[in-house]
Image: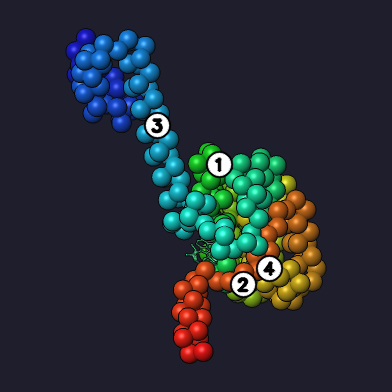
Amino acid sequence: MSIQQIQQKMEMLKLNHTLPLLSDLLQEATKQKSSPLDFFEKVLTLEAEAREESRIATSLKVSGLPKGMHLDNFDFLFQPSVEKAKIEHLVTCDFIRHHENVLFFGPPGVGKTHLAAALGVKAIEMGYSVSYYTVEELLLQLKRRSEIPVAKQRGRAYVKNALVVVDELGYQVLDRNETHLFFQFISARYMRASTVITSNRSVKQWVHIFASDEMATTAILDRLFHKAHIFNIDGQSYRLKDFNKMIQESQKEKS
Ligand SMILES: Nc1ncnc2c1ncn2[C@@H]1O[C@H](COP(=O)(O)OP(=O)(O)O)[C@@H](O)[C@H]1O
Ligand SMILES: [Mg+2]
C-alpha cells in the first residue's frame, strides 16, 4: 500500500492533525527503529491530543466566557477573603456532577467575574458544556422566546448546558416580566444542572433587583441556595489596586 492510499484513509477517518505529519512520523520511526506498536501509539496520541485541544478552543469560544481569566492568574494573596481551598475543591467539578450552584458576592473589582469564568474554563477542560451570560444578555435571550416556558426550551444552551454562568446580577433592576423569566430560568435548572451567579448586591438587597416582588425573590433564593457554595468577597478592587497604591505613596511623600 502506498503512502497516498494511507493518507486517503486518514482523510476519510478525519485524522486531520497527523495526516500532514505522516511522512515525517514514518521517517522518524524508521530512524529510531520504533516498534509498530510504538508507532501506532504515537500517531493515535498525537491525534487525540490535537482533537482535545481543538475541542477546548471551540467550546471556550462558543461559551462566551471572557478571555484570560484562569485560576492560575488569580492572585489569592491579594484577596484573602476568598478561601483558596474552597475554590480548589470546586475545580474538581464535583459541584457540577451534584447539580450544585456557586454564588459570588462582593463589591466591584474584587474578582467575582474572574473566579466565575475560571470555574467555567475548568469545566470545559473537564468536558462539560458551559455558557456565560451577563444578566442583560440572558434576559435578551429569554425575552426572545418568552412565549415558550423556559423549562420547555430544552435545546437552548441556558437550559441544557451542565454549567451556566450568570454574571453581574444587581447592576440592573428587573421589571416584573424579567423577574418572572429569571425565576423560570432558575427553576428550569434547579436540581438538574449547575448555575454560577455573581452579584454586587447582598441577598438582603435582592428584592430590589427583582421588581420589589418578595414572593418571586424568595422563590429564586430558595432554589439557588438549596445546594450552593457561597463566597462573600470583601476586599479591595483589583482594578483600583495600582491607583490606591499611587495615592498611598503620594500621601506618604506629603507627610
Ligand atoms: N485576585 C486577583 N488576581 C488577579 N487578577 C484579578 C484579581 N481580582 C480581580 N482581577 C482582575 O481585575 C479585573 C476585575 O476583576 P473582576 O473579576 O472583573 O471583578 P468583579 O467581577 O468582582 O467586578 C479583571 O481584569 C480581573 O481579571
Ligand atoms: Mg464582574
CA gap between label 2 and label 3 equals 40 Å
Q: Nearer the viewer, mark 1 or mark 2?
A: 2
Q: Earlier in the sequence, mark 1 or mark 4?
A: 1
Q: Which residue is mark 2?
A: 107
Q: Nearer the viewer, mark 1 or mark 4?
A: 1
Q: Looking at numbered disc 1 in the image, what kind of residue is underneath it?
A: Tyr
Dot label at residue 179: 4
Residue at 51%, 81% in the rendered image = 248
Does residue 107 appear left or right of residue 58 in this picture?
right
Q: Is mark 2 within 8 Å of ligand 1?
A: yes
Q: Which residue is mark 1?
A: 128
Q: Nearer the viewer, mark 3 or mark 4?
A: 3
- Residue 195, compared with residue 41, is above or below; it is below
Dot label at residue 49: 3
Question: Secondary structure under badge 2?
Answer: loop
Q: Looking at numbered disc 2 in the image, what kind of residue is underneath it?
A: Pro
Q: Looking at numbered disc 3 in the image, what kind of residue is underneath it?
A: Glu
Q: Answer yes or no: is residue 10 visible.
A: yes
Image spot of residue 49 (x, y percent): 40, 32
Question: Secondary structure under badge 1?
Answer: loop
Q: Hey, which quadrant is residue 13 in on the image?
A: top left
Residue at 68%, 64% in the rendered image = 232
Question: Which quarter of the rendered picture does the N terminus lie within?
Answer: top left
Observer-nearest of 20 and 250: 250
Q: Nearer the viewer, mark 2 or mark 3?
A: 2
CA gap between label 1 and label 4 equals 28 Å
Q: Earlier in the sequence, mark 4 or mark 2?
A: 2
- Residue 212, compared with residue 50, is above or below; it is below
CA gap between label 4 and label 2 equals 22 Å
Q: Earlier in the sequence, mark 1 or mark 3?
A: 3
Residue at 21%, 15% in the rendered image = 31
